[in-house]
Amino acid sequence: MTADKYVLVTGGAGYIGSHTVLELINAGYKVVVVDNLCNSSEEAIRRVSELTNSTIPFFPVDLRDKEGLEKVFSEYPIQSVIHFAGLKAVGESTKIPLEYYDSNVCGTVHLLKIMAKYGTPVFVFSSSATVYGDATRFENMIPIPEECPTGPTSPYGHTKMIIEEILTDAAAADPNLKVGILRYFNPIGAHPSGRIGEDPRGIPNNLLPFVAQVAVGRRTMLQVFGNDYKGSPDGTPIRDYIHVVDLAKGHLAALAKLDSVEGDNSEGFVRPWNLGTGNGSTVFEVVHAFENATGKTIPLEIIGRRKGDVVNLTAKPNRANTELKWKAELSIEDACRDLWNWTTNNPWGYGQPEK
Ligand code: NAD
Ligand code: WQD
């Protein structure tokens, strides 16, 4: 870590970004945040400032705003970029794919061009396990290693895959560029302070935010999308749920690793790392973990399968364990407890009750 150099966190007001900003500042990094607030609130940044007793420079800028982004690089000596900013809803991406390509792909290309102009060498990218598609189409690919062939099945997944390819090409052409591609599995939970957490707009797409809203009385019951999956002990799909604080710490581990990588004379460095626990849990197991951690009962009904869901997405995280010296430490119960703490303290997230 360089004391007078900054880490630029794009999407730093968002769910994973805000938790990572907090961990970075607590570890002594100086941070600048860029976020267009299309899926987040500036209140998250304010609370991270409060929790870390620090001032966080914040630019409410879209990545595609060339002048706005250039201003950030001209005002701060940016040593590394952690790039969270982007659109992330799989279902929505099938309705408005061009918005996804524009924000995710064009936004990233623009960011990389400015980094090259200012000589910023380190880039950490938020990719997703969604790039693997259905890994059960291969034999022996569960748990999923980074070597598993990719095959995303949604426009959102395609944007992540394309960005990974762009990063690989950019590093091949630039000996100064060092890129870490972090493929997250299913991030859950909230900071144990209960001050920051996930604040989905509208009806949550993801399992645990929905469960928490049922528990707090905002929704009546959970709909379980199918219990007839072969290869699952109870018929519901298996996922690798990872506490967001563990995930945030994975970014610090990636920065440390990239800082220590020696440059090559001819090309830069690029490497994907899975960030998951290595343990799979079914939907029912997660609901029970939430009930045990909170003492709440979650009414549920089984309905048909959700289009695009696959039976098993469990990480093989050995590469990150070894190369990044990072390992997820927290359990699903820890995540459920912290999610519940966040939800009861902020039943309407960062905002106001719905009218
Ligand atoms: P989030 O929506 O909470 O955070 C993304 C942030 O980026 C938001 O604050 C949003 O306002 C901002 N943003 C979006 N487009 C922008 C643009 N063009 N310019 C500037 N800011 C922009 O999402 P998250 O869950 O924190 O996810 C962060 C990253 O991790 C995303 O890239 C997402 O695709 C990826 N990811 C998330 C998950 C997950 O389940 N949460 C899993 C795998 C990968
Ligand atoms: C988990 C399980 C559902 C909601 C998504 C993205 C992925 C990544 C992480 C960004 C599944 C079931 C859910 C509900 C349910 N994001 N479920 N009822 O689909 O594994 O991954 O988030 O990169 O790309 O696809 O997560 O939380 O939506 O679903 O039964 O109301 O819970 O069927 O089995 P998913 P999820």
Image (cartoon, grey):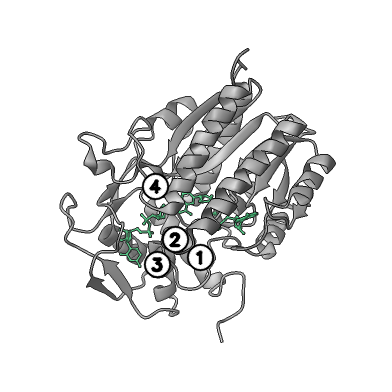
Identify which residue, 183 or 2, lies in the foreground.
183
In the visual, does 216 lie left or right of 312?
right
Mark 3 belongs to which amino acid? Thr
What residue sits right under mark 3 in the picture? Answer: 294
Residue matched to label 4: 130
Are the residues tagged 1 and 2 within 8 Å (C-beta)? Answer: yes
Assign a secondary structure to mark 2.
Answer: helix
Specify which label sits upstream in the sequence, 3 or 1. 3
Label 3 Cα crowd, 10 Å radius (few <14 / some 14-19 / many 20+): some
Task: Give the Cα separation between the discs numbered 3 and 1.
Answer: 9 Å
- Relative to 222, 256 lies left or right: right
- Label 4 to label 1: alpha-carbon separation: 29 Å
Q: Where in the figure is residue 352, as x and y percent of width and height? A: 61, 78
**Residue 133 in the image: above or below residue 307:** above
The C terminus: image quadrant: bottom right
Residue drawn at x 62%, y 53% is: 18
Provide the residue designation for mark 1: 341
Dot 2 or dot 4: first in sequence order is 4
Q: Which residue is mark 2?
A: 337
Helix, strand or loop at mark 3: helix
Determine contact: label 2, label 3, CB under 8 Å: yes
Please report contact status of discs 3 and 1: CB closer than 8 Å, yes or no: no
Q: Is residue 179 left or right of residue 186?
A: right
Q: Nearer the viewer, residue 17 or 194?
A: 17
Residue 351 falls in which quadrant of the image? bottom right
Image coordinates of residue 336 in percent, x first then y, are: 42, 60
Q: What residue is drawn where x is 23% and y is 37%?
A: 138
Q: Residue at x 29, y 60 (%)?
A: 283
Ligand 1 visible in quadrant: bottom right
Q: Earlier in the sequence, mark 4 or mark 1?
A: 4
The amino acid type, in three-letter code, at marker 2 is: Arg
Q: Is residue 30 above or below residue 53?
A: above
